[in-house]
């Protein structure tokens, strides 16, 4: 392993130097795509548009910005919106003007975390972008529609990056093991250690490389002093677990375990075991499961298993689903936990679930005749002549707001009882009311 106090981190050393070394993002880097043309300098300076690159961490935003600069021999300047201000931006613009006028050389300004810039700070970028004094390549992990001013968006290409696949992350790790810039073949990575690093990376190449570098350090420290090594040092699963302080979770996001653990979460909530439900939630999160997938399952359970036993469980679950999409991990774990606890502790009723299934079964069996004439639409020419709406009783005109009326088709009258409330939770109050309503609505 290369050593030295001033050695850059592995993720920096392994940054791709050419398009051929970039992993993932095949769609935005396809031949002829706007980003590829920008990197290759196609169209000359007149065709060089600025770009907003939006994507999760570790997907190559900084790498692509460097390639935009180096592939066409442009000057590269990097600023971070966390520390830079309007003065820094104007300094870059002035220097870019000199480079253009004196050396006919374009300047690429890479602005990381542009969403942290205020509206006024983003406004300062507009003149340089408008005149193509600089090629702005701005990176953000937040939705540009909400975090970047419209005039800047309209003057730039919007490039959306996606998380790397498991195979692409594994490829990044394999390259780092053998490449002279990386670990130079001095280490060997065990298969289960690779799987663990891929799993905890969450599609983030930088996180995977940082964890690999830490695991290599743990493996190196475990070698006895003076030991005579024959071959590369093996990095084991234990080394990776110790390095990243995460236990390896037995979980395959695309195989049986994905469905087994998701099923166990749902059944634990249905069975009202909060501890078990939180265990399976933690298991899914630690394995790198998409928190949005988990949130959707919780929403379904809130209707299927809790239903009208506690109608507020669905409100909590839906709110959690939207919050998770906006916030992301690691904070999303707290929101998901609240929704899981609510579902697990709530009184249970599947009456609505059973009711809709039975109604659909009747429809598929051909039951359910014509809509009663009184219920048919009467708001169009000729409807009255057809008798549509005749005999309809407007419920609000009745003393208790309930009208005696045939709502079901004739062949289902007196034969249908889809909704059967339980005596649990809020639904305990609905049972007597539904019986009273039926006695008032139905003629027999």
Image: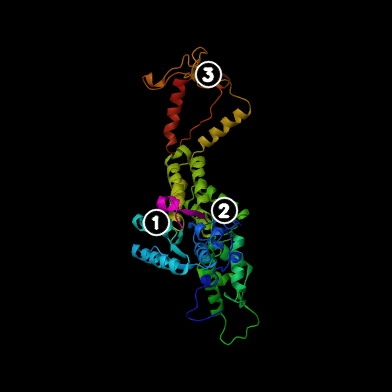
Residue 177 shows in the view? yes
- Dot 1 corresponds to which residue? 126
**Contact? badges 2 and 3 (CB < 8 Å):** no
| The disc label shown at residue 431, or none | none
The answer to which image quadrant residue 117 occupies is: bottom left
Residue 163 shows in the view? no
User: How many angstroms separate mark 2 from mark 3 (CA)?
Assistant: 48 Å
- Dot 3 corresponds to which residue? 372
What residue span does the magenta drawing correspond to? Answer: 140-160
User: How many angstroms separate mark 2 from mark 1 (CA)?
Assistant: 50 Å
Local SS, label 2: helix
The answer to which image quadrant residue 212 occupies is: bottom right
Image position, residue 114 (x, y; %): 41, 59
Q: Nearer the viewer, residue 368 or 197?
A: 197
User: Could you tell whether 96 is left or right of 444 in the image?
Assistant: left
Image position, residue 200 (x, y; %): 54, 63
- Dot 2 corresponds to which residue? 261
Image position, residue 252 (x, y; %): 60, 57
């Amino acid at each position: 392993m290369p050593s030295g106090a001033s050695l850059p981190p592995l993720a920096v050393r392994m940054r791709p130097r050419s398009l051929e070394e970039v992993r993932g993002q095949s769609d935005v880097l396809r031949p002829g795509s706007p980003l590829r043309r920008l990197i290759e300098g196609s169209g000359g300076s007149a065709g060089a548009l600025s770009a907003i690159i939006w994507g999760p961490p570790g997907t190559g935003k900084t790498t692509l910005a460097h390639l935009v600069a180096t592939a066409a021999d442009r000057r590269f300047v990097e600023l971070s919106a966390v520390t830079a201000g309007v003065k820094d931006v104007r300094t870059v613009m002035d220097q870019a003007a000199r480079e253009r006028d004196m050396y006919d050389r374009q300047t690429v300004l890479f602005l990381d975390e542009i969403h942290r810039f205020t509206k006024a700070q983003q406004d300062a970028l507009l003149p340089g972008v408008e005149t193509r004094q600089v090629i702005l390549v701005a990176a953000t992990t937040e939705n540009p529609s909400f975090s970047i001013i419209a005039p800047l968006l309209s003057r730039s290409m919007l490039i959306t990056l996606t998380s790397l696949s498991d195979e692409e992350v594994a490829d990044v790790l394999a390259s780092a093991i053998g490449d002279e810039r990386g670990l130079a073949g001095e280490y060997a990575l065990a298969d289960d250690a690779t799987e663990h690093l891929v799993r905890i990376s969450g599609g983030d190449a930088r996180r995977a490389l940082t964890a690999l570098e830490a695991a290599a350090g743990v493996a190196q420290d475990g070698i006895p002093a003076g030991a005579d090594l024959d071959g590369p040092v093996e990095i084991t699963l234990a080394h990776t677990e110790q390095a990243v302080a995460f236990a390896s979770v037995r979980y395959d996001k695309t195989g049986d375990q994905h469905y087994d653990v998701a099923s166990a979460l749902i059944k634990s909530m249905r069975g009202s075991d909060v501890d078990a439900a939180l265990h399976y939630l933690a298991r899914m999160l630690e394995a790198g499961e998409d928190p949005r997938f988990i949130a959707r399952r919780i929403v379904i359970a809130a209707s299927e298993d809790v239903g009208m036993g506690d109608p507020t469980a669905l409100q909590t679950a839906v709110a959690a689903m939207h919050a998770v999409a906006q916030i992301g991990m690691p904070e999303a774990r707290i929101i998901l936990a609240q929704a899981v606890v609510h579902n697990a502790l709530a009184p249970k009723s599947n009456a609505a679930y059973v009711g809709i299934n039975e109604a659909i079964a009747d429809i598929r069996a051909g039951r359910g005749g014509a809509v009663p004439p009184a219920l048919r639409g009467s708001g169009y020419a000729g409807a009255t002549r057809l008798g549509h709406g005749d005999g309809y009783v407007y419920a609000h005109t009745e003393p208790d707001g309930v009208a005696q009326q045939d709502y079901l088709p004739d062949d289902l009258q007196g034969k249908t009882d889809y909704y059967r409330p339980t005596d649990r939770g809020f639904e305990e109050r609905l049972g007597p009311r539904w019986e009273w309503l039926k006695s008032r609505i139905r003629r027999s």
